[in-house]
Amino acid sequence: MIFSFFRRVLRLRHHTAAPRLTVAALLALLLLADRVFPPPSPGAAAHAQVVLARDGTPLRAFPDSAHIWRHPVRLDEVSPRYVEAVLAYEDRWFRWHPGVNPFALARAAWQWARHGRIVSGGSTLTMQVARLLEPMPRTLMGKLRQIARAVQLELRLSKREILELYLTRAPMGGVLEGVEAASRAYFGKPSRSLSHAEAALLAVLPQAPSLLRPDRFPERALAAREKVLARLETTWGQAAIADARQEPVIAQAVREPLLAPLFAERARRLLPRRQRIDTTLDANMQTAVEQLLATRLAVVPPRVSLAALVVDNATLEVMAYAGSADFADDQRFAHVDMVQGKRSPGSTLKPFLYGFALDDGLIHSESLLSDAPQSFSGYQPGNFQADFSGPVSVSEALRKSLNVPAVEVLDRLGAERFVALLRRGGLRLSLPRGAAPNLSVILGGVSVNLEGLVNAYTALARAGLAGKPRFTSDAPLEEARMLSEGAAFIVRDLLEAGGPTARQVDGGIGARRGIAWKTGTSFGFRDAWAVGVSDRHTAGVWVGRPDGTPNPGFFGANVAAPLLIDIFAAIDEGHSPRRAPPASVTQARVCWPLGTRADALPPALCHQERRAWLLNGVAPPTFADRLRAGAARYTDFRDATSGLRVRAACAPGAMRAVEMARWPALLEPWLDAATRRRALPPAWAETCARAMAPEAGLKIVGIADGQTIVRAGNGAPPMLRLAARGGGEETIWLVDGRQIGRSPANRSLAHVFAEPGRHTITALDESGRHDRVEISVR
């Protein structure tokens, strides 16, 4: 602007060159002075910062070195009423003068000379902005310097930019500067919503900000407001002025905004140069989430904290962010942001394990898995409830968060591949220094944070694409392929409704909530998690102590999941109609124990039929038996007369071939009587008595099948010593499916039967050999 003005002057026509040269020399001197003594830049000094929600609600204000709260605001974000009031009362010629109004200065000087005091000011808005940017003494030399600075600002900035500087920096009493800060602090509303009366009051407030504060001196503020309203009568009309005069002066106490404080702190660190940080946070949603977290404080121990994160699935914008439960409670580690804290994820990674296995063609939604005591090269996982269910499907294993089946699938997929796929999808995992991925990864043997988990779970609602949460609308959209679209659909449906088989049983009751979620609990009850997705949002919750101290009895299902459901109830408007599966996903009937399609098997080999989701039309067979060699589908032979089991070398007469389907050896103890009759071969014929069935060899001794144990009166519950012969080096004992202990070979294990009723006792060894008896306790 300076150079264009300089060029216009040089183009002026004069009769001689001398005046032109004189003007040019004077302008050159002025230009040199402007370059040598430039006006201060609005952002040169340490500036105040304000972090705003998506609707402009202040989340947190960070004062400058003078502890000033300043909310930068654009002209189109301020009520036109306020702009009209400021220009009418402060500088009606603002849009036409060059920074200085000589007529106003002459009037002010005349009034001062006549009355011996200042009657009216001669400063323009530009001069006031110059003084706000560079405080000056109220002397003649100070006034001259202010005039020079005003001219410099006019040459460098547009009228709009100068006006926006005034709107942001005008003193409003105490630590407040700018109309937006004052409007929020005094009236609890954005400046775009100011009434006529409020606009007039804030327009006059910079005249004497300490004396006219509406929260402290409402009578003075009212009198000053009346002067502005009188001057604006021709602009606003008599009716509007009359209504404004009826409005009382009511202002709330000035309080620092403190919504999503840890999020605001993080945004400030990410964008340190911005005075105004416009974020994606939804103020109403944030308030609801913080209130829900606050209500939980009454039921958790004193030093326990909570964190929550909500992301919009369509835009990946962060809608709510609570890094701690109570920012004012240092006992709860208030300033530790647990959205970013790295902790053990417990079981929250299991959905991705099954999704990767689907993509690799290892499983379908109803693949048969073994929930039984197993050893994987010395690693012996147990379930959270310390019991076992025997044969389970993928859908059941995921919904019940069973550990042993998950380790079984991970053993087939590979721990290193699992970690690599998670990282490819954008989830940052931390392993212990020098450690390589192993089977414990799926049970929490890595570290992640809540932000990373929510990032990963967005893939379930975004056709398999995970996305990095965005804090500002101008942040880039960062996505990565976590799962195929089909795998993401199947996993989400299993978490939400249990899959096709569960719908046949309960009618899809789970799907009516429209939320698919997973919980997790780290070792020692240190961390409780719940992460879930709806059509619109992905949300995650963490509960625990930031210092890692255990919280016995607090786990994902009983503390984190209820909070997550309440958050979805508060922020979500419900779910859309049932989603149609993508083209890669179909339903089919499959059979246990083989796991393949029912329409490709004879009925004799289909011991149990289930309806499954298939990916790309593939129905992978059940995993090969880890304990027993041989094919799962085999041909056995029967004596044609007795029906007993025979072999060609020992058959007493004619024999017939029978096609059989074999269950995994670990699951045979859990089969019911009807399934056992179909699945297990009959006894050997007498001529083949020396042949040994694969499942033979281990025998429970000292207790007979069907035996009744009677408790003596009110005496102690009966205790039995459980013993077995013929097994391996160690025997695993289960009572009613719950593992109660292990005993070395030829050693017994004592167990007290405190509950009356029927009990099933099962003995297993590491080779899959087993025996089972049923007793009654009275």
Image: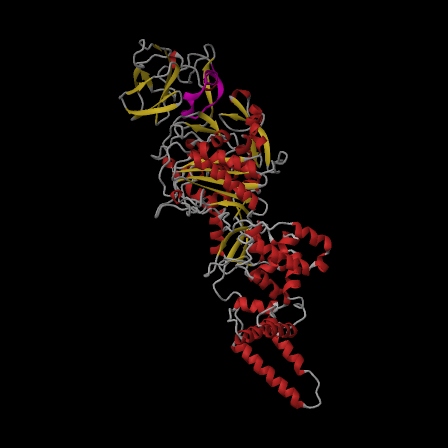
x, y (%) of residue 285?
55, 43
- Locate residue 729 relative to residue 314 in the image: left or right: left
Name which residue lies at 35% across and 39% down: 549
Q: Is 587 above or below relative to 31?
A: above
Q: Nearer the viewer, residue 320 or 763?
A: 320
Q: State yes or no: residue 390 in magenta.
A: no
- Residue located farthest toward the front when viewing the structure as drawn: 115
Q: Count of labels shown? A: 0
Figure quadrant of residue 637:
top left
Q: Is residue 638 left or right of residue 4?
A: left
Of residues 203 and 95, which is closer to you in this image? 203
Range of residues picked out in magenta? 655-677
| Vertical placement of residue 598 versus 170, above or below | above
Q: Where does the C terminus fall, quadrant-wise? A: top left
Looking at the picture, does residue 638 appear above or below residue 234? above
Q: Magenta stretch containing residue 665, yes or no?
A: yes
In the rendering, at what x and y percent does residue 413 appear? Answer: 45, 39
Residue 353 seen in the figure? no
